[in-house]
Image (cartoon, helix red, strand yellow):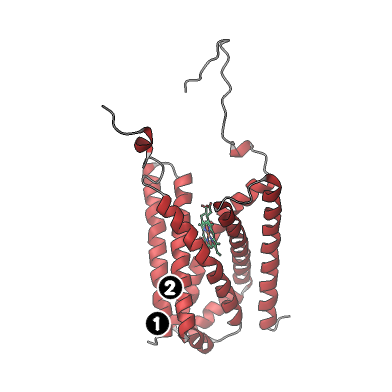
Amino acid sequence: MTSEKSTTGAAKARPLSPHLQVYNPQITSVLSILHRMMGVALSFGSVFLIYWLSSAAYGPDAYGRAQDFFGSPIGQLILLGLTFSLFYHLANGIRHLIWDVGLGFDMPMLRATGIVVVFTAFGLTALTWIVAYVRAGII
Amino acid sequence: MEMRTPLAHARGLGPAKSGCTSHWWAQRLTSMALLPLMLWFVVSVLSLVGADHGDYVLWVSDPGNTLLLVLTVVTIFYHSEQGLHVVVEDYVHSEVGKITALIAVKAFAYLGGIASLLAIFRVAFGS
Ligand code: HEM
């Protein structure tokens, strides 16, 4: 690497892009990387969508086994993770679409909408699972 | 004499090796489509909690549900493939690794999408 020297011979300080390993996490940067992680998680989660739809095509026995799997503790944990990922990614996706038309970029607005996204994600996840458990007769 | 502007030289040299406005647009369009579709999907799955295979068959056979489910599946796999494409471009830097990962992402999206659609049609139209 060639570094440019100033007239005094010292290396000239040049602007750097944020170095993620030493970058102080802030609500904006954390929410941003979460959007990506949740999108990737949902993409892996589509395996379970394929499994569910396919099981129905194989008939009642296979569909029953799929339901048993989704009802098991590990199945429920996966579905809970996917529900939260979906609602987080959906809410933050709306934030992205608003940015795309050029709105909401000032710092207080970025924080406020970020907080709204987190509360929406938790709220819709809780609502979904309460409805699911009421319908299943568990609560 | 050099006739091309510096911009013309730079075009197509990004990680995508092509223009990206159409990719960008498609990502926005699928995002907007997924907003109502995924909400419909969650409500539908909730309506199927505790349903047996017969109830599921009835639900999928409803023409409106067949249509919405097909749209949801197609949009999910399209949007997810495009999203993963960008993620791979951002993190995989070796040319061989990048091409391998992009093929894997595409193959998964097509296989998964087609398998899902066949499964829906099989149930909706009877076997
Ligand atoms: C629920 C409705 C959804 C909305 C509104 C939405 C919105 C978005 C938006 C706006 C982006 C672009 C982010 C950017 O420009 O950096 C994006 C990226 C992405 N989405 Fe979605 N999405 C939705 C559902 C899904 C689903 C169901 C999946 C997976 C099955 C998914 C997977 C991804 C992936 C992998 C990315 C790339 C992440 C990145 O580049 O950081 N999305 N989504």
- Check the residue under mark 2 and report the chain it is in: B
- For the N terminus of chain B, the quadrant is top left
Q: Amino acid at mark 1?
A: Arg
Question: Hey, which residue is sitting farthest top in the picture?
Answer: A8
Q: Who's the residue at 67% across and 53% down the image? A: A114
Above or below B42: residue B64: below
**In x, y percent, where is residue B107?**
38, 60
Secondary structure beneath dot 1 equals helix
Q: Estimate how packed mark 1 is, as few (under 14), some (14 to 19) or many (20 or more) residues with alpha carbons within 10 Å.
A: some
For residue B107, side relative to residue B41 (left or right): left
Which residue carries the number 2 mark?
B116
Q: Who's the residue at 44% across and 58% down the image? A: B26
**In x, y percent, where is residue B3?**
29, 32
- For the C terminus of chain B, the quadrant is bottom left
Q: Amino acid at mark 2?
A: Ser
Question: Hey, which residue is sitting farthest left in the picture?
Answer: B1
**In x, y percent, where is residue B112?**
42, 67
Which badge, 1 or 2, is on the more N-terminal residue? 2
Above or below B87: residue B114: below
Q: From mark 1 to mark 2, how far is it between C-alphas?
A: 10 Å
Q: Which mark is residue A38?
A: none
For residue B26, side relative to residue B55 (left or right): left
For residue A51, side relative to residue B45 (left or right): left
Tell me if residue A37 can be seen: no
Tell me if residue B18 can be seen: yes
Which residue carries the number 1 mark?
B122
